[in-house]
């Protein structure tokens, strides 16, 4: 049973380009969470999605950032017109469901985005 | 609003010493979950433990132990006889259940350095 798969592991983009980060949740998991970790900081929540639905995007910057979790395929975090301040590690986590039986959130290995 | 405080930014110990990482949380909910994650130098996030708010029993797993005290809103993590491989950043996290979202909030992390 593969864990949460994120790709690419490392992504380098020039300022103004687009970055697309992918996250395939664990088998059987239908909830996906994206977090951003800036250097020397903790993880900041960005967005929570279920299949075909954005449940909570309160942590997403208002512009240039979007996320989706289609019926088929991985969840995508998209950053348009990247700037140097977007350089960070982006982590995806998945869980089977919310509720009393929610177990630990399983994280992927992250995508390290560097904007040059 | 939920909040997690890890007051210790960095802890440095010598191998075989015991070390305790502090975690203090704030929540208005009676139902919540607490977590610890380990982030080794390789960067991935490793789930260590989940504890729900109704279970105040302390937990021991090998050299790791956790002390959950609702009276002081703390969920401290102790490593006994530390080893160099324990060197990592450790994150404490809290998820509440307002509306069932259970989105985890993370502390800023404590960097543990174990010297040989």
Image: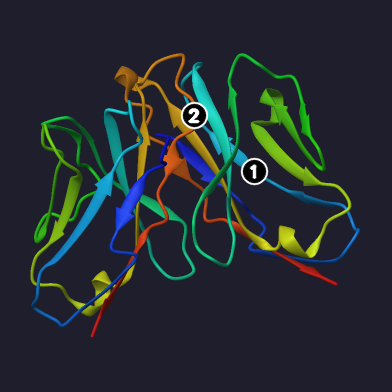
In depth, the one of B28 and A97 nearer the eye is A97
Determine the residue positioned at 31% across, 41% down.
Answer: A33
As helix, strand or loop, the secondary structure at mark 1 comes to: loop
Percent position (x, y) of residue A97? 34, 21
Label at residue B27 = 2
Left or right: residue A115 versus residue A19 is right
The residue at the point 45 percent across, 31 percent down is: B95
Residue under disc 2 on the same chain as residue under disc 1: yes
Question: At numbered mark 2, what does the secondary structure look like: helix, strand or loop?
Answer: loop
Instruction: Tell me the crowding category of disc 2: few under 14, some 14 to 19, or many 20 or more residues within 10 angstroms, Cα based.
Output: some
Instruction: Tell me, yes or no, whether the two marked residues, 2 and 1, touch with CB atoms within 8 Å.
Output: no
**What residue did someone put label 1 on?**
B23
Q: Please report, as a chain letter, where disc 1 is located.
A: B
Q: Nearer the viewer, mark 2 or mark 1?
A: 1
Q: Is residue A53 above or below residue A65?
A: above
Q: Give coordinates of residue B106: x percent, y percent.
A: 48, 46
- In this rendering, the answer to whether B32 lies above or below B64 is above
Residue A17 rendering spot, x and y as whole percentages: 9, 75
User: Residue sitting at 87 percent across and 64 percent down?
Assistant: B15
Question: Mark 2 to mark 1: distance in Å?
Answer: 13 Å
Q: Residue furthest bottom?
A: A116
């Amino acid at each position: 049973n593969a864990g949460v798969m994120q790709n690419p592991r490392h992504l380098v983009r020039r300022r103004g380009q687009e970055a697309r980060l992918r996250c395939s949740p664990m088998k059987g998991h239908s909830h996906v969470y994206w977090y951003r970790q800036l250097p020397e900081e903790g993880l900041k929540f960005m967005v929570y999605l279920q299949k075909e639905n954005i449940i909570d995007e309160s942590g997403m910057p208002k512009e240039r950032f979007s996320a989706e979790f289609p019926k088929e395929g991985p969840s995508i975090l998209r950053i348009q017109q990247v700037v140097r301040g977007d350089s960070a590690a982006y982590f995806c986590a998945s869980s089977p469901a919310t509720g009393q039986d929610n177990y630990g959130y399983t994280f992927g290995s992250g995508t390290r985005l560097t904007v040059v | 609003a939920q909040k997690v405080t890890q007051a210790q930014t960095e802890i440095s110990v010598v191998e075989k010493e015991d070390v305790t990482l502090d975690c203090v949380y704030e929540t208005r909910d009676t139902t919540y979950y607490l977590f610890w994650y380990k982030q080794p130098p390789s960067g991935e996030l490793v789930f260590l433990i989940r504890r729900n708010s109704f279970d105040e029993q302390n937990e021991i797993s090998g050299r790791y132990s956790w002390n959950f005290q609702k009276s002081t809103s703390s969920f401290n993590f102790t490593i006994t006889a530390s080893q160099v491989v324990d060197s990592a950043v450790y994150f404490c996290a809290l998820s509440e259940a307002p509306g069932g979202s259970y989105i985890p909030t993370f502390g800023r992390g404590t960097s543990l350095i174990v010297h040989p």
